[in-house]
């Protein structure tokens, strides 16, 4: 009994010492900080908006929200943010900050909603630091995970193809992985993958990009998986992510030489072309609004204007509103084309990163023929 009592006293002394050290460490962080407890909670959701090809982040607090700071180690674009006043900070990739924004909430509101555009291929976490209007100030941290193929959503296996007969490319993997392991790897690539592995010998999922409209089929069983898509960038992302996952778990993985259908390149460009053309046309039309508005103020008769310029003048407010995020969307599509250009030739063992400037030049002086020619040969 005496030995047990001595041991207990020694343990208590050790615990007292740890508490003392913890207090000292806390006081060293900031002598001005005061530890507080709060019962208020902040709920968050981050849902894909397929029609806008972006995510809507919703933050709800039991107390009125004062400020929201957003941070991520991946490149993001802030689109709509409601009545909140945004302030975008310069990216600092060296310190893991590829995206930093501060939102000051106007009025009294317990909810903040923002639209965020993600780049596929990049993945990580979007952190939101929510400061409520209570005394003393309290910061709530909420985090949302963003997956590599964040703009894809599951579709039924029997969903009809929107674009007729589509040329597909294929990446096949074999190795020492089981059903559960490959299922987990697919979950690490795509959102909305079922949490449980189906009880069957092979599993198949279909996904569709809400941005480009391209599809990808995933079919796997024990020791083998096949990925098919017309979009080579999607296959490149899947290959890179699963290869990293396999390396982390030291699982044997053999990625076979991809089967490339050259017709798929033109197919993807045909899907992206109208998007780019529309964005660039809007950018060009907005350039004339200032001069046309001034001309109308100086002259009553503007009948000499072309029908297109008359329409620009008539729809000036609508066009300006539509153009609000146009530059961001052009930059986004420029990145998509740059990455597709890299991946298109990477599967052939050709490095074209030194020629990315040609993609930018093409967008500045855009033509469909030039786009096709650029992707036709390295």
Image (spheres, rainbow, N blue to C red):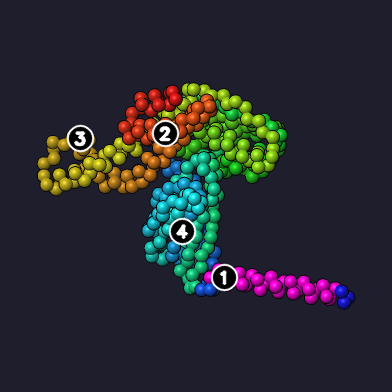
Q: Real-space Cα distance between discs 4 and 3?
A: 46 Å
- Residue 28 image label: 1
Number of dots carrying numbers: 4
Look at 57% across and 36% down and name the residue there: 240
Look at 16% across and 36% down and name the residue there: 305
Q: Residue furthest right?
A: 1
**SS under mark 2:** helix
Look at 61% across and 42% down and name the residue there: 187
Label 1 vs 2, first from the N-terminus: 1
Within 10 Å of disc 2 (Cα), the crowding (few <14, some 14-19, many 20+) is: some
- Residue 307 image label: 3
Q: Nearer the viewer, mark 1 or mark 3?
A: 1
Q: Real-space Cα distance between discs 1 and 3?
A: 70 Å
Label 4 vs 3, first from the N-terminus: 4
Could you tell me if the residues under marks 1 and 4 are in contact, i.e. CB atoms within 8 Å?
Answer: no
Residue 166 % position (x, y)? 50, 25
Q: Real-space Cα distance between discs 3 and 2?
A: 37 Å
- Residue 215 image label: none
- Quadrant, the N terminus: bottom right
Q: Nearer the viewer, mark 4 or mark 3?
A: 4
Tag 4 residue: 69
The segment highlighted magenta reads 4-30
Tag 2 residue: 356
Label 3 vs 2, first from the N-terminus: 3
**SS under mark 1:** helix
7 inside magenta stretch = yes
Would you say residue 325 is visible in this rendering? yes
Between 89 and 108, the one nearer to me in the picture? 89
Within 10 Å of disc 4 (Cα), the crowding (few <14, some 14-19, many 20+) is: some
């Amino acid at each position: 009994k005496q030995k047990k009592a001595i041991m207990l006293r020694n343990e208590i002394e050790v615990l007292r010492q740890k508490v003392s050290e913890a207090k000292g460490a806390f006081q060293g962080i900031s002598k001005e900080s005061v530890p507080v407890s709060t019962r208020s909670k902040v709920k968050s959701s981050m849902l894909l908006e397929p029609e806008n090809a972006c995510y809507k982040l919703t933050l709800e607090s039991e107390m009125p929200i004062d400020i929201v700071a957003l941070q991520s180690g991946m490149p993001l674009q802030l689109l709509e943010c409601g009545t909140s006043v945004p302030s975008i900070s310069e990216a600092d990739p060296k310190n893991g900050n590829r995206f930093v924004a501060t939102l000051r909430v106007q009025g009294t509101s317990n909810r903040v909603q923002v639209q965020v555009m993600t780049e596929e291929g990049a993945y990580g976490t979007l952190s939101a630091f929510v400061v409520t209007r209570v005394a003393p100030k309290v910061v709530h941290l909420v985090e949302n995970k963003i997956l590599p193929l964040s703009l894809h959503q599951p579709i039924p296996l029997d969903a009809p193809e929107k674009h007729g007969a589509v040329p597909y490319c294929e990446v096949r993997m074999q190795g020492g992985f089981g059903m559960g392991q490959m299922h987990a790897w697919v979950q690490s690539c795509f959102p909305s993958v079922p949490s449980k592995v189906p009880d069957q010998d092979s599993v198949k999922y279909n996904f569709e990009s809400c941005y480009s409209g391209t599809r990808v089929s995933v079919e796997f069983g024990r020791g083998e998986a096949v990925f098919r898509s017309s979009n080579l960038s999607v296959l490149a992302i899947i290959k890179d992510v699963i290869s990293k996952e396999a390396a982390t778990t030291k699982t044997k993985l053999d990625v076979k030489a991809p089967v490339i259908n050259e017709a798929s390149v033109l197919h993807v460009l045909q899907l992206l072309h109208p998007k780019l053309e529309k964005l660039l046309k809007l950018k060009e039309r907005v350039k004339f609004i200032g001069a046309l508005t001034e001309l109308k103020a100086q002259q009553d008769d503007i009948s000499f204007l072309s029908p297109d310029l008359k329409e620009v003048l008539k729809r000036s407010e609508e066009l300006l509103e539509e153009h609000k995020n146009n530059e961001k969307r052009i930059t986004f599509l420029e990145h998509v084309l740059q990455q597709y250009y890299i991946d298109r030739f990477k599967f052939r063992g050709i490095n074209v990163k030194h020629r990315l400037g040609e993609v930018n030049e093409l967008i500045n002086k855009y033509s469909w023929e030039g786009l096709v020619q650029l992707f036709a040969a390295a």
